[in-house]
Image (cartoon, rainbow, N blue to C red):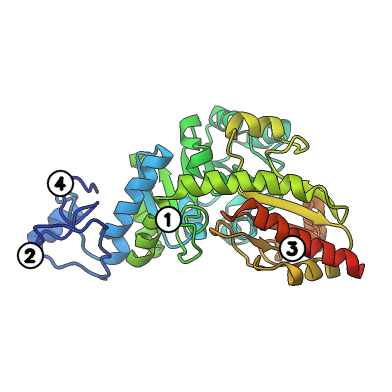
Amino acid sequence: MSSKNNPNRGSSGPEFLSTPPLVMPIYQSAAYIQKDVDQIDRVYENHEPDGYTYGREGHPNAVHLAENLAQLETAEQAVICGSGMAATACAFSVLLKQNDTVVASDQIYGRTAILLDEYLRRFGVTTHFVDITDLSAVETALRCSPRILFFEMISNPLLRVANAPALIQMAHAQGSLAVVDNTFPTPVAFRPLEHGADLVVQSVTKMIAGHSDVTLGAVLGSQSWIEMMQHGMATWGLSASPFECWLAQRGLATLSLRMERSSGNAQQLADYLDTFSGIKHVIYPGRKDHPDCDAARVLFDPCYGNMVSFELAGGRQSVDHLIRNLDQIPLVPTLGHIETIISHPASTSHRSLTVKRRSELGISDTLLRVSVGCEAIETLEQRFRSALQERGKTGVN
């Protein structure tokens, strides 16, 4: 569907207004009135692209957001879903069938791993997890010619960087599709489709919306793929509400500004945290001590993202003590908020994994992940300094 020439889409307002509103209206309706049965046929057969029928199948706010996000990601089209996981599930449900195989990064969001390893396994889909930063291991895994190679551009929560151009080329050489989760870098820092990816998924909830007041996702790619995704989204009931799409469109307008500010803050905060003896090590793709710093520099420079992870010295008690003493930096299981927040992956995003598996991946009980916001960097440094110094005074381990 296109918003060109449609008075009910884009920056235009309802057709009965001679002075349309500056801001896109919220079309808070579950269904749309049809003039007659012939019009229903025209809408469903796409002979009337400006028409709608039922909210689950599409509405002006979702289309408006999809068009703007597709433009930013350099995609032909996009479909908006009710969450990042809904977008990932939509892509997998459309692309996969019984006896298909997926090769996936072993460092992906916990719920995505559950979807692949538990739920899709029930439908006869096999997933092989591999260290996506080990190109030799990926090449070996791809010899089975899987249907999909799936990876996150920057992994959650250890912030490993995928060499997307090489991985996409390797997948295509085996006849596999490359599906990339681009949530952490966002299209401001990197656009996988420009490097040959077949589909991109985004958790719009995070940096794109930016204010932690929506739950949305998106699948982006060519027109032919997205038409299939649109059908899958409507069939599985993975649709998004008009109001949340409207809110996300507001956030999208400032995405570049927020990414620039929060990424700069993250670089400085990572370097600052590394000066404290109570922190064992700091993880940030823009640092020279990051294991993938060379790839990050080629792919992302100068915007390495707003995520910083670090591991505290001591045990679980030290984590709780730090969190309780962090002023105005709350413990929240999300990321991409306009203000700085912190999370504990072992007890949230990756709690479903066994202790042994988390240990194998390097996700310890003292690992913390910081989603850096747009505050003044001096304010952030002061807040962490106060909490870390308080921890040192009490001698918590």
In this view, the mark in front (4 or 2): 4
Nearest to the observer: residue 244 or residue 171: 244
x, y (%) of residue 250? 38, 57
Mark carried by residue 35: 2
**Few, some or many C-alpha atoms within 10 Å of disc 2 (few <14, some 14-19, many ≥20)?**
few
Q: Which mark is residue 346?
A: 3
Q: Disc 1 marks which residue?
A: 251
Please indicate whether residue 265 sits to the left or right of residue 10 in the image: right
Mark 4 or 2 closer to N-term? 4
Residue drawn at x 20%, y 59% as measured from the top left: 21
- Label 4 – label 1 distance at C-alpha: 25 Å
Q: Is residue 11 left or right of residue 359?
A: left
Marks 3 & 2, CB-CB < 8 Å contact: no
Q: Secondary structure at mark 2?
A: loop
Q: Are marks 1 and 2 in contact (CB under 8 Å)?
A: no
As helix, strand or loop, the secondary structure at mark 1 comes to helix
What is the C-alpha distance between the residues marked 3 and 1? 29 Å
Q: Residue 215 at what x, y percent from top left?
A: 47, 64
Badge 3 amino acid: Ala
Nearest to the eye among marks 3 and 4: give it.
4
The amino acid at mark 4 is Asn
Kindly identify the amino acid type of the residue bearing the numbered disc 1.
Gly
- Give percent across and percent down for residue 29: 25, 70
The disc labelled 2 sits on which kind of residue? Lys
Q: Nearer the viewer, residue 197 or 23?
A: 23
Q: First in sequence, mark 3 or 2: give its number.
A: 2
Question: Pointers 3 and 4 in contact (CB under 8 A)?
Answer: no
Up/down of 181 relative to 333, above or below:
above
Give the labeled residue for mark 4.
5
